[in-house]
């Protein structure tokens, strides 16, 4: 992913957005009416993270509204941002993480939400919305889709076989101590393919400010990652779900709900594989993914209809119950499965919450540094 492109100055970003071409989403039906009709056509183009929606969320919305949804997926903020920066994505709703949304708002990429069209706003959790408002003032541009943490997913039996019954599965020691991770290499270690997630985890482990913009500090994180690099068998941000579920890898530094989806898939397959997820005790990242409407969206009214629909407690609970992430909809809480509400790795208790950090909005020069470090780590160049 070319973060160099993304690191463009805000002026350049706005310019790019203003003179963008007009491509439709890849999966949009060929031959669709090109001109924007006076009344909004019954179409909605959504671009969301993979493995991040309920089984019938879209189907039910289409049935109820008669709006045809095109639903495309990505697995990194960098991919989404590159599209947004080049302008005219063809999408009516996109889902950046909050630290990306913040700088995209600065670049003028989004339109403010029309809250008069969102009566279900009342269902949102005021505490979480206030936290989010630190990066999206007055919650002007986005609602939270889901939130979660970045931690350790693992195959219970394989990790035990490799490291014994006292394997530090609740600690970053599992990943960042060469004597541990070297023993896991042969059963497969996957790490998210995104520098901010992994560099900040390394810095947190080292007791540094995970969000430091200081090059010397960031280089300490790089040094730690370089030490364990020989034992990382792959970098990916979505395939690891099935790989964990199938037993193709034994450890993943991944996202909470994704790992719990791997657990469910293994259970459904009845393959005897037990997958677990832990927020490392040293602390980890908690992040918020936000649904927002691009400024040039052709179906903003339909986008608002969809937002209001997902803010219904039963719809939002249905999504979380399926993807195993937490949400910011207070009215949905009583409808969540018990094992979401009571699972401390999905709904962290206050003492764990206190150890979680959120991601900083990274300036272009730090972004470029992250990218250089990442490329070198992955390719050796
Ligand atoms: C969905 C993962 C989304 C988490 N598969 C990234 N913020």
Image (spheres, grey):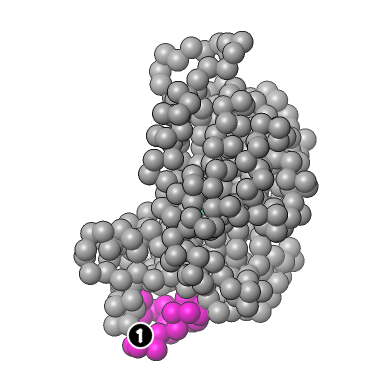
Q: Is residue 315 above or below residue 262?
A: above
Span colored in magenta: 164-184
Magenta stretch: residue 195 in it? no
x 54%, y 66%: residue: 347
Q: How many marks?
A: 1
Magenta stretch: residue 182 in it? yes
Q: Is residue 224 above or below residue 101?
A: below
Residue at mark 1: C-beta within 8 A of ligand 1: no
Q: Position of residue 209 (x, y in %)?
A: 70, 72
Quarter where residue 82 is shown? top right
Q: Position of residue 362 (x, y in %)?
A: 70, 55
Quarter where residue 355 is shown? bottom right
Q: Position of residue 372 (x, y in %)?
A: 60, 56
Q: Is residue 278 above or below residue 46?
A: below
The reply to whether residue 207 is visible in this rendering is yes
The reply to whether residue 380 is visible in this rendering is no
Task: Assign the magenta stretch its main secondary structure.
Answer: loop
x 57%, y 43%: residue: 311
Foreground of the two, 90 or 83: 90
Other residues around mark 1 within 10 Å, as few (<14) / some (14–19) / many (≥20): some
Q: Position of residue 242 (x, y in %)?
A: 32, 57
Foreground of the two, 49 or 86: 49
Side (left or right) of 322 relative to 291: left
Side (left or right) of 297 relative to 338: right
Q: Secondary structure at mark 1?
A: helix
Side (left or right) of 258 relative to 79: left
The residue where tag 1 is placed is 163
């Amino acid at each position: 992913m070319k973060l160099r492109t993304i690191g463009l100055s805000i002026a350049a970003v706005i310019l790019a957005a203003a003179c963008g071409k007009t491509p439709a989403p890849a999966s949009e039906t060929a031959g669709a009416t090109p001109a924007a009709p006076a009344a909004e056509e019954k179409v909605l183009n959504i671009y969301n993270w993979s493995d991040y929606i309920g089984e019938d969320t879209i189907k039910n919305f289409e049935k109820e509204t008669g709006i045809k949804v095109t639903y495309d997926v990505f697995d990194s903020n960098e991919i989404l941002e590159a599209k947004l920066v080049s302008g005219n994505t063809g999408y009516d709703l996109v889902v950046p993480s909050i630290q990306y949304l913040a700088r995209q708002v600065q670049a003028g990429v989004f339109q403010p939400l029309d809250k008069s069209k969102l009566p279900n706003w009342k269902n949102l959790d005021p505490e979480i919305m206030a936290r989010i408002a630190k990066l999206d003032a007055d919650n002007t541009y986005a609602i939270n889709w889901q939130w979660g943490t970045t931690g350790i997913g693992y195959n219970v039996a394989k990790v035990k076989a490799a490291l014994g019954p006292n394997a530090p599965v609740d600690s970053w020691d599992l990943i960042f101590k060469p004597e541990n991770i070297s023993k896991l290499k042969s059963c497969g270690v996957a790490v998210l393919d995104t520098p901010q997630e992994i560099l900040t985890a390394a810095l947190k482990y080292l007791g540094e400010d995970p969000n430091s913009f200081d090059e010397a500090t960031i280089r300490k994180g790089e040094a730690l990652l370089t030490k364990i690099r020989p034992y990382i068998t792959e970098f990916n941000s979505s395939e690891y779900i099935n790989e964990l579920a199938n037993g193709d890898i034994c450890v993943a530094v991944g996202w909470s709900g994704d790992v719990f989806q791997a657990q469910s898939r293994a259970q459904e397959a009845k393959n005897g594989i037990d997958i677990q997820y832990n927020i490392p005790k040293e602390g980890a990242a908690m992040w918020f993914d936000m649904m927002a409407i691009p400024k040039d969206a052709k179906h903003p009214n339909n986008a608002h209809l969809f937002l209001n629909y997902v803010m219904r407690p039963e719809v939002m609970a249905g999504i979380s119950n399926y993807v195993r992430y937490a949400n910011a909809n207070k009215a949905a809480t009583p409808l969540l499965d018990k094992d979401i509400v009571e699972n401390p790795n999905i709904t962290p208790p206050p003492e764990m919450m206190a150890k979680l950090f959120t991601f900083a909005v990274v300036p272009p020069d730090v972004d470029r540094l992250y990218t250089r470090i990442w490329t070198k780590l992955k390719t050796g160049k």
